[in-house]
Image: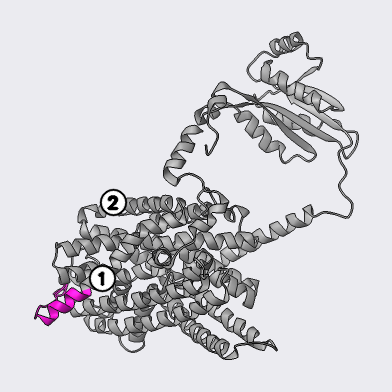
Amino acid sequence: MWGATLSKRLLVGRPMASNRLGETLLPKWLALPIFCSDALSSVAYATESILVALSAGGLAFLAAAPWITVVVAVVLVVVVASYRQTCRAYPRGGGSYIVSHENLGPSAGLVAAAALLVDYVMTVAVSIVAGTAAITSAIPEAAPHTVAIAIGLVVVLTVVNLRGLRETGTVFAAPTYGFVVMIFVMFGWAATRSVTGGHLVAESAGLPVLPTEHVTGLLALLLVLRAFAQGCTALTGVEAISNGVPVFRAPRARNAATTLSLLAALAVSMGVGITILAVVSGVHTAADPSQLGLPAGATPRTVLAQVAAAVFGDGSIGFYALQALTAGILVLAANTSFNGFPVLASILARDRYLPRQFYTRGDRLVFSNGIVLLALFAIILIWAFDANVNALIQLYVVGVFIAFTLSQLGMVRHWQRQLAEPDAEGRAPKRRAQAINAVGAVATGTVLVVVLVTKFLDGAWIVVVAVPVLVVLMRAVSRHYATVAGETALAESRPLGPSRNHVIVLVASVNGPTLRALAYARFLRPDTLAAVTVPVDDDPEDLRKAWDAADTGVALTVLDSPYREITRPILKYVKDFPRRGPRDVVTVVIPEYVVGHWWEQLLHNQSALRLKARLLFQPSVVVIDVPWHLRSAAVAPLPGG
């Protein structure tokens, strides 16, 4: 026990009191890396996703990449403007779930919540795998260990997040800002080289891009739409700020809205710039290496790595610095989900749609259970898809655009209700806000349709199935809590106490713990008192003689157990114990050792644990443990001490 506590303290840190919650509130400069690392990091693979999709049509289609990037940037600006309204209207946080629940009804709220939960898991998996790809692009020898590296990074990120929100932000600030600065340094260096007559040539510029099929007419349009859907991965993570408004410093809503604006400015400029450099330097990439004339199994470097090599020089300090920072921010991009998922899960638990364990904060004032659950789901996905970013990306974006669309529709309804009030003030700003959200709803709804059409057969159907399954599960949890509340509600007539108490003391051997349990049983002043044993290995006559010699004054009942088990004979004895009325209670008293070390726990009390678990389901049965502290327990430190 002491060893486990020490290990936890070393990894997570000392517990924080509830009154220190205010110390965890975030200034804007820390909130940006915590909540925006996902959206900022997506520029590292959004361009690649667009180029990979376009490569199916051959070399000619790559020229469409800048225009697709511009359209994605416009959608990003619209979504950010829409969510700025959400931050101001709902400063309590909750984002898409709260907005949809309050304005479109509980069903819409649950669909938005389920879609976001799925997307948060996808964000962790995709970000970590993309970060691992950046590592293997710089260190090809690490490629065979991609899955292990990715899972290890999830574990490290989980531990960091369990240490607390503010510590997480401090750790993540340097890589996030370093990545942003390095991207703009790359832009500046590329501009300088262009002005001085230098040429940017990517290592793949001379490779062919063989089309996988003959693409014309409608198929060409579908190919472009598919590339657009892939590029919309740049919008993931935008909603995280609206979920986390309560953790901002005051004025919360204004600081959250300002952080969203900073996110839009940085993400748009970086995304468009990287795409332009990729096209100018002639980067060629494809999901299948054979399209580039490469042998089977060859893994081309990421688009950003090729751009960095073209600008700074392959193997240069600038190249390795950008690759290191890219890997860092891609791994840390998962942090957006490590903040969004637990907060959303806590809100759902508060509303009785998820187990109550997700509502409570852990030692470091973070929602630890949500963090751990998110990590487990992400690890399962990474393992199941063999850490393949091109396979995982097909499941991406669907969930977030479901939530985007429902949220914007909910905000339109919210402003309509505000305007319908007879004494509504500020009608003009509210109409302007409603118009912004209406444009956002149309934009995100359109993208959702495109994403579903172009990605459905490639894996998006998994998300389409997962969302309703989650909704059904959350409704089942809600019904259970409602049933429990109904059954446990105070009635007009208070419940009566037991009319008689029949006490049974379980005897394994005649020793100090047993006699203490018997003494406690007498203290209860029972109507009847019985001592029961189930001899499995020992001779029952020897036990009976020892019991008689102890002169307890209570007869010892020996239960027969032909199959050498303890639990079933005792359960039958308790169930068949004679009661004289419906309000009679049977109390089972169990002497139990209290040990100080985890390994000692493995050596004691296993039968008692099984028995207590089974007795829990017996009606009108009360179980009482009478502890006997061993010396190791007396000197062991208290948990958390």
Q: Residue at x 43, y 63 (%)?
A: 336
Q: In screen coordinates, is 579 left or right of 600?
A: right
Q: How far across and how far down the image is residue 477, in percent?
A: 65, 58
Q: Residue at x 55, y 49 (%)?
A: 17
Q: Residue at x 43, y 68 (%)?
A: 28
Q: Examine the structure image and report whether residue 193 is included in the region drawn in magenta.
A: yes
- Please identify the residue farthest to the left as the structure is shown: 197
Please give the range of residues in magenta. Answer: 187-207
For residue 450, which quarter of the picture?
bottom left
Q: Which mark is residue 183?
A: 1
Q: How far across and how far down the image is residue 571, in percent?
A: 73, 32
For residue 622, which quarter of the picture?
top right
Nearer to us in this view, 281 or 78: 78
Task: Please say which color scheme the image uses.
Answer: one colour
Q: How far across and how far down the image is residue 124, in percent?
A: 41, 61
- Neighbour tally class for label 2: few under 14, some 14-19, many 20 plus, Cα within 10 Å: few
513 up-or-down from 366: above or below? above
* Sequence-earlier tag: 1 or 2: 2
For the residues marked 1 and 2, what is the alpha-carbon distance in whole angstroms? 28 Å
The kind of residue on which mark 1 rests is Ile
Q: Which mark is residue 145?
A: 2
Q: How far across and how far down the image is residue 259, in percent?
A: 43, 72
The kind of residue on which mark 2 rests is His
Q: In screen coordinates, is 531 left or right of 495?
A: left
Q: In screen coordinates, is 472 left or right of 306?
A: right
Q: Is residue 295 visible?
A: no
Q: Examine the structure image and report whether residue 591 is included in the region drawn in magenta.
A: no
Question: Is label 1 or label 2 in front?
Answer: 1
Nearer to us in this view, 301 or 221: 301
